[in-house]
Each structure stands twice: as structure tokens, then as C-alpha cells.
Image (tube, coloured by chain):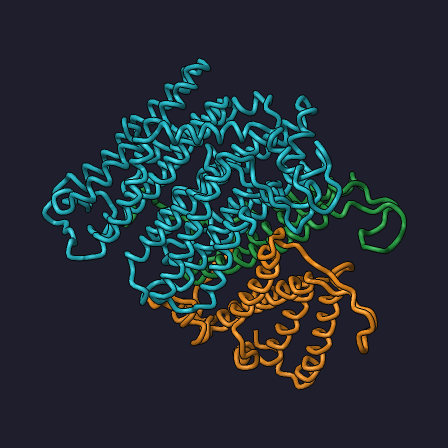
């Protein structure tokens, strides 16, 4: 189970990196969403192999439980990721309205930041 | 994000709205020891409101809701923060919670209640407000409407700002490049 | 009342109250200023308490460490809290002088308070995951402030800032996960106790390197600084003052905390790497500053160059180097934000901050010139100003450790800093050209300069009373490096849950 999770994490990180390095806004957005999910999966895998263990719910089952802490951490990370993704969506939308493009290469084509008015 | 102009959809949404909110209430109340809680209940309620906006049109939502989602979120944050801060007044640590068992409550029987419920209520309000706000702003803007209604514009935008939507409607034939 | 949580709670409640208040008005401004003043008083009281006592610990929800989350205020955290509330107060007052309530953005003050909440939580937190949460609170508020008043051109610059920080947050999350797997705990004190036995474990070094990447990114260490120099100039002057003072210094603080209090002290390779990266940061930062031709851009690059000095002190890793780093942070936060505010005032007077079109400021407004010169020379490190003592202490440690190349780089960076500060001085203040007008009739500049004068006075006091400030910094450094005393303070708190003795 741990090996498969590790492989999946690797694939997700690779996909996310590939997508973030694209020029299209939509791909960049998807890249960041996949990236945050990959990180959440890393956290999940830190609770160890779940084989034969109970879900961490109070008052249910008598066997050994899965470590609940990483799950609490993931919940927090998901909430934060939700907020940041929403901000990213709105920022990209605003860039599209302002600059009339959804291509990052076009957006930064005329970049000269050494002087500013 | 105008929904399908369908009588069946609209009537169905009106029923589903209440069902979803019942589920949200259930999730909120069981959240202390079982799966559930303020965040997930808030998301359920927010999705019911979003469903409603699909059926009735997002422009109608400010009239139906009668509250400002940002203020709702701020109220939730206030409730949660005050629940956390209240023990400080008694010299106890931040976020300490207290529980009690009530016996023989009419209709419910024995109930286990505590201050975490108040905290969860704050989270619930926060999530409902924020999630609604996010979706409604984007939906209004993509339809070429102003993202903020007049009341919100007074509260959350500076007089120096120009609404983005005036220059860019949804279908004014502007060039779109999505190529890599 | 438990004092340790107040620096987080006060700005949070203020922000919520401001959201309800709605439109900007003089009353709303006065309320914010009073709250910011109260935060400063609380922070000052915390410094007073922690100077003589062991760290103040508050278990959140009354659950004992290591199972509960703790908030720990030691002397370094209290100093940082004092600096953050001082900078926040000064920049808020400066913002009042800059624009009337009629045109103030209603969300600016609440967002500034949310930002301060996140910054203060990062200083106070006693576990790794809560540090992540604090970073996120801070970052989300900073994203919002960055784009709040940006125009169409400027908004572009926010995207790289967001993207890089998102990747940094993801890495931090993974780092927290690895730390939990490795040590079985996220509590700083508990990690410190458990990590000491496994300091030769390569996984600890790997974790330290991962955290180095994350915090180096927040602090703006070479080569991870590219998000900073283009994003800070798009901020309005008061907010830029707060950002330049506090945000990167949170990264430096966390490096101090994690390398000093949490991780084992014998990770020599990591420290050496940090010192050399710091050398590169100093040089590349100052070269970037020379390449820029507008005040905010030059100052933004100087943040990086100065970060190099602080991180160099951390990399040298002796108690005295840590004290020098803390002294440098104290000096730098005040000098840097006041320089941004001076730059904002100069830009208001000349209606631009492009050096080609500025001039005549010294003749028309000598007060502003004096303020700029004091802070600029302090930044470059001329005695007896505060910057000199910080640099002097760092260089002494460098020479003691026979790191002659790094010392040489630091001196070179200082000279180049002086050069680029004089560039601003020559163009904007000393230079005179017929066509550029100085709008002295714009009464706002006088009040803005008064706020800056207050900051300059504090900065001068640090320089002239360097001995006393250094004593405080020294005690803070000793406290940061004393892992056992930290753990003792954290575990001695009685609360619910089995307290795991050290």
C-alpha cells in the first residue's frame, strides 16, 4: 500500500510540475490544484500503512486505529488550499479581463521592470 | 451561470434546498465526535445556495439572501474567536472548551452539549459566507454584471476603483489565445 | 488574562470589527490606531516579562504539550512582536497622513490587521504545523493586499509572487509531514529533545535542507528571491513599508528558531551552505539594486542584500552570531520600513519615483533629506548609526571563524549599498533640474515626514544605545539556543493530557 501511494505521489508531483510550467492559465491552475493534492497525499501517507486498522472515530471498534493526526493536518491543509485556489482563480480571471489573454508567455512578453513610472 | 430555464429544475431545487440544509444541520450537530463539523456543514449549505442561484439566476440572489455574505463570514469569525477568547476572561487558556450533559430534554432525551458547538457554528457561518461570496462574485462577473451590488460596493471598494466589468463583457468578441 | 495569545487575538478581533464597521471614517481610523497602540503596549510588556523570566507558555485548549498546541513567547518572539506592532502602528499612521478617509480603500486596514495576526502567530507558535498555518494566514492576507489597490499593469506582478509562495507552501506541508514521520511529533520542544539523539541521521539533514528551501524562500535567500523585487514596488507606500519590514524577516526569524531551538546544533554542513548562500544573496541583491532606476525598486533589492547579512550570521552559528543577527533584525526592520516611507514621501513630492525625473528635494524639503540620509547611511553601515553595529558584530564573528571570503563579500556589499543609496541621494535630493517640480504645497508630506521622523528617532536610539540593545539581543540569542530550557518551559505547564517529561 505504501509503495503504491509513494508512486502515486511521484506521478502527481510530476504532473503538477509539468502543468505549472505550461503557459495556459487553465493548465497552471490545474497544476496548482494537483500540487496541493499531492502534498495532502504525502501527509496522509505519513500516518503509516493503514492495513487492518480502524478509522479514527471515537467510540467505534476496538482494534488499533490509524494515526489521526495527519488526517487533521490534511483537513487544515485542504481548507487553506481551498482559499488559496479561490484566490488564484480570481487573480487569473482578473488578469484575463485586464490583459485580454490567457497565455502567461504573452502576459510577460513585454516585461521590463528596471524602470517604473 | 444562468441555469436551465426549466420549471422542473426550479421546483426540484426548492425541495432539494431544504433537504441539503437538513443534512448540513445534521452534520453540524454530530461533528464533535463523529465525521462532520462546521466546515463540511458550511460547504453543504453553501452548495445548496449555489444550487438555488443556478435555478433562479445569480442576479436574484442578493434579493433572496438579504444578508451580505462577507458580513456573515465576519460574524462567523467573530463567534469562533470570541468562543476561543471567552476562557481567557476567566484566566483559562485560549480555546478551552467546556461540556455538559443534559438529561431529559424534551424530544431529544439525554444530550451532550459543549462550547465546541459554538465554535463550529462560527466555522459554519464563515464557510457559508466565504463560499457563497466566491462563487457569486465570479458568476456575476462572468455574466457581465457588476461583481458587487451597490451596498457591497459602498462597503468593500474604494471610490478610486473602476469596475472591471464595464470594459469587458462576456461576449464582446475579444481575442482569446489559449495556445501554449 | 493569558498574555501570550493577546498579540494574535487583538489584531484578529480588530480586523473583524473593522469588517463590520464598513466605510472608512475618522472614528474607524482612530479605533485601528488605538488597537495598534494596544498591541505595541502588550508586546512591550511581553519583552519586559520575558527578559527576566523563562518563556511564557500557553497550552491552547488546555491540552498539554506535546499533544496539544502550545503558544510560546520567549524573548526573541517578544522582540519580534514588538517590532511587528511598532512597524504596523507607524505604517498605519503614515497611511492616515497619506490619504483622507474618503478615498481610503475600506479593506486595507482589516487586511493589514489580518496580516499582523498571521505574522504574530508565526512568532508565537510552538509547533511546526501551526507555523504553516501562520504562514498561510500571513500569505493570504499579503496576496490580498498586494492586488487590492494594484492597477492593471501591476496586477501582473502579483502572479509570480503567488505562484512561488504556493510552491513554497506545498513544500512546507511536505516538510511538516516528513518531520512528523521522522520524530513522531510536531512540537518544537519535543522535536528538539528527540532530534538530539539522531543528529547523525541523514534524514534529519535532508529535512533541514527541505526546511531551508522553504524558509529561504520566505526570507528571500539566493537563489529563491526572484518573487520579491518586482512585487514589492506595486504596493502603496504604507503597505510596502510594512511588507519590507516584516514579511521577509518572518523567514529569518523562523530560520533562527528552527536551526537554533528545534534542530540539532551539529548540522555543520547545513550551516555552511546557509552562510555561502547568504554571501551570494548579499552580492546579487545589491547588484540588482544598482540595476534599478526607481526608489522602490532599489529599496526592494536592498531588502535581499540585507537579508544576506542576517542569514550569514545564522550560518556562522555561534551564540554571538545569533545575537548579532537579532540586533541586525531590530535595526533593519525599522530602517527598511522608514526608508520605504521616505521613498513614498519623496515620490509624493516629485509625483514620480523614477530617478530620472526626480530632483530638487534637498533645497525644498531639507527635513526629508536629513531623514533619508540618516536611514540610508545606517543601511550602508556608517558609525554611529544602528546599521554599523550590526554589521560590525557580524564581521567580527566572520573574522573569528576565518571566513575571509564571506567577510570580503559583506564589505563589498556594504560599499555597493552606500553607492546605490548615494545614487538616490544624488538624483532625487541633491540633483537639481529645471523641469521637475516639488509639490511642497501638498501639505500631506509634512505629516508623513513626522511619522517617519518618529521611526528615525527610534532607529537613532538603537544606534546610540547599541550597548543596551545588544545586551537584550544577546540574552534572546542565548535563550533561542538553549533547547533544554525551552523544552523545560514548554513541558512544565500543567494541563490536560499526560505531560511527557523531558
Q: Position of residue B170 (x, y in %)?
A: 47, 70
Residue shown at the point (28%, 56%) measured from the top left: C97
Q: Say whether residue C24 is left or right of residue C220.
A: left
* Chain (cyan): C
Relative depth, front residue between C456 and C302: C456
Residue shown at the point (39%, 21%) measured from the top left: C395
Q: Say whether residue C311 is left or right of residue A57.
A: left
Q: Say whether residue C298 is left or right of residue C444.
A: right
Residue shown at the point (48%, 42%) measured from the top left: C46
Residue shown at the point (57%, 43%) measured from the top left: C125
Q: Number of labelled discs?
A: 0
Question: Which quadrant does the C terminus of chain C fall into?
Answer: top right
Relative depth, front residue between C312 and C168: C312
Q: Position of residue B141 (x, y in %)?
A: 48, 70
Residue A99 showing in the rendered view: no
Residue C191 showing in the rendered view: yes
Chain B's shade in the image? orange
User: Can you tell which quarter of the image residue C268 is in?
Assistant: top right
Q: Say whether residue C232 is left or right of residue C377.
A: right
* Chain (green): A
Q: Position of residue C32 (x, y in %)?
A: 40, 59
User: Can you tell which quarter of the image residue C363 is in?
Assistant: top left
The residue sitting at the bottom extreme is: B7
Relative depth, front residue between C73 and A82: C73
Amino acid at each position: 500500500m505504501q509503495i503504491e501511494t509513494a508512486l502515486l505521489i511521484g506521478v502527481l508531483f510530476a504532473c503538477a510540475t509539468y502543468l505549472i510550467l505550461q503557459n495556459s492559465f487553465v493548465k497552471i491552475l490545474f497544476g496548482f490544484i494537483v500540487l496541493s493534492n499531492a502534498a495532502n497525499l504525502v501527509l496522509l501517507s505519513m500516518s503509516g500503512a493503514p492495513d487492518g486498522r480502524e478509522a479514527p472515530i471515537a467510540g467505534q471498534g476496538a482494534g488499533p486505529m490509524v494515526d489521526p493526526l495527519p488526517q487533521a493536518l490534511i483537513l487544515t491543509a485542504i481548507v487553506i488550499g481551498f482559499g488559496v485556489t479561490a484566490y488564484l482563480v480570481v487573480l487569473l480571471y482578473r488578469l484575463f479581463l485586464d490583459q485580454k489573454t490567457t497565455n502567461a508567455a504573452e502576459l510577460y512578453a513585454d516585461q521590463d521592470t528596471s524602470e517604473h513610472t | 451561470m444562468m441555469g436551465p430555464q426549466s420549471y422542473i429544475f426550479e421546483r426540484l431545487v426548492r425541495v432539494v434546498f431544504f433537504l441539503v440544509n437538513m443534512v448540513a444541520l445534521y452534520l453540524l450537530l454530530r461533528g464533535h465526535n463523529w465525521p462532520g463539523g462546521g466546515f463540511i456543514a458550511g460547504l453543504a449549505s453553501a452548495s445548496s445556495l449555489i444550487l438555488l442561484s443556478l435555478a433562479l439566476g445569480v442576479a436574484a440572489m442578493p434579493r433572496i439572501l438579504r444578508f451580505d455574505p462577507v458580513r456573515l463570514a465576519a460574524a462567523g469569525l467573530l463567534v469562533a474567536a470570541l468562543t476561543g477568547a471567552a476562557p481567557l476572561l476567566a484566566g483559562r487558556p485560549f480555546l478551552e472548551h467546556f461540556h455538559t450533559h443534559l438529561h431529559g430534554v424534551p424530544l431529544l432525551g439525554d444530550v451532550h452539549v459543549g462550547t465546541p458547538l459554538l465554535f463550529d457554528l462560527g466555522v459554519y457561518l464563515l464557510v457559508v459566507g466565504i463560499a457563497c461570496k466566491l462563487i457569486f462574485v465570479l458568476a456575476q462577473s462572468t455574466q457581465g454584471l457588476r461583481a458587487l451590488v451597490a451596498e457591497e460596493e459602498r462597503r468593500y471598494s474604494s471610490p478610486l476603483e473602476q469596475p472591471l466589468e464595464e470594459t469587458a463583457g462576456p461576449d464582446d468578441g475579444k481575442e482569446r489565445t489559449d495556445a501554449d | 488574562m493569558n498574555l501570550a495569545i493577546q498579540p494574535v487575538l487583538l489584531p484578529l478581533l480588530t480586523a473583524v470589527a473593522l469588517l463590520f464597521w464598513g466605510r472608512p471614517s475618522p472614528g474607524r481610523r482612530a479605533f485601528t490606531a488605538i488597537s495598534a497602540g494596544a498591541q505595541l503596549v502588550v508586546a512591550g510588556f511581553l519583552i519586559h516579562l520575558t527578559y527576566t523570566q523563562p518563556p511564557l507558555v500557553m497550552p491552547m485548549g488546555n491540552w498539554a504539550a506535546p499533544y496539544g498546541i502550545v503558544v510560546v513567547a520567549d524573548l526573541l518572539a517578544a522582540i519580534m512582536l514588538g517590532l511587528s506592532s511598532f512597524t504596523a502602528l507607524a505604517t498605519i499612521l503614515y497611511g492616515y497622513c497619506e490619504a483622507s478617509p474618503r478615498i481610503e480603500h475600506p479593506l486595507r486596514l482589516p487586511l493589514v490587521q489580518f496580516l499582523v495576526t498571521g505574522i504574530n502567530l508565526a512568532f508565537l507558535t510552538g509547533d511546526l504545523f501551526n507555523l504553516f498555518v501562520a504562514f498561510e494566514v500571513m500569505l493570504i492576507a499579503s496576496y490580498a493586499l498586494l492586488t487590492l489597490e494594484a492597477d492593471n499593469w501591476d496586477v501582473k506582478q502579483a502572479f509570480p509572487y503567488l505562484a512561488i509562495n504556493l510552491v513554497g507552501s506545498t513544500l512546507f506541508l511536505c516538510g511538516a509531514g516528513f518531520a512528523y514521520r521522522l520524530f513522531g511529533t510536531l512540537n518544537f520542544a519535543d522535536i528538539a529533545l528527540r532530534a538530539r539523539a539522531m543528529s547523525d541521521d541523514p534524514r534529519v539533514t535532508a529535512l533541514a535542507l527541505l526546511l531551508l528551501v522553504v524558509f529561504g524562500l520566505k526570507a528571500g535567500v539566493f537563489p529563491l528571491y526572484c518573487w520579491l523585487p518586482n512585487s514589492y514596488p506595486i504596493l502603496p507606500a504604507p503597505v510596502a513599508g510594512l511588507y519590507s519590514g516584516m514579511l521577509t524577516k518572518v523567514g529569518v526569524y523562523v530560520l533562527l528558531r528552527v536551526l537554533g531551538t528545534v534542530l540539532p546544533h551539529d548540522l555543520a554542513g547545513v550551516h555552511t551552505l546557509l552562510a555561502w548562500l547568504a554571501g551570494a544573496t548579499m552580492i546579487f541583491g545589491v547588484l540588482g539594486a544598482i540595476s534599478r532606476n526607481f526608489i522602490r525598486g532599489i529599496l526592494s533589492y536592498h531588502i535581499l542584500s540585507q537579508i544576506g547579512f542576517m542569514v550569514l550570521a545564522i550560518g556562522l552559528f555561534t551564540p554571538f552570531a545569533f545575537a548579532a543577527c537579532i540586533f541586525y533584525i531590530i535595526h533593519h526592520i525599522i530602517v527598511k520600513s522608514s526608508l520605504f516611507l521616505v521613498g513614498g514621501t519623496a515620490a509624493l513630492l516629485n509625483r514620480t519615483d523614477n530617478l530620472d525625473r526626480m530632483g530638487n528635494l534637498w533645497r525644498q524639503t531639507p527635513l526629508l533629506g536629513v531623514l533619508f540620509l540618516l536611514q540610508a547611511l545606517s543601511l550602508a553601515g556608517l558609525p554611529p548609526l544602528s546599521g554599523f553595529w550590526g554589521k560590525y558584530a557580524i564581521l567580527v564573528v566572520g573574522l573569528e571563524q576565518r571566513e575571509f571570503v564571506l567577510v570580503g563579500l559583506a564589505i563589498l556589499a556594504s560599499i555597493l549599498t552606500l553607492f546605490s543609496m548615494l545614487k538616490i541621494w544624488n538624483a532625487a535630493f541633491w540633483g537639481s533640474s529645471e523641469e521637475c517640480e516639488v509639490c511642497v504645497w501638498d501639505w500631506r508630506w509634512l505629516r508623513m515626514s513626522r511619522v517617519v521622523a518618529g521611526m528615525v528617532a527610534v532607529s537613532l536610539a538603537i544606534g546610540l544605545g547599541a550597548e543596551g540593545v545588544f545586551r537584550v539581543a544577546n540574552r534572546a540569542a542565548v535563550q533561542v539556543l538553549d533547547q533544554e530550557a525551552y523544552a523545560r518551559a514548554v513541558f512544565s505547564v500543567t494541563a490536560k493530557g499526560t505531560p511527557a517529561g523531558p
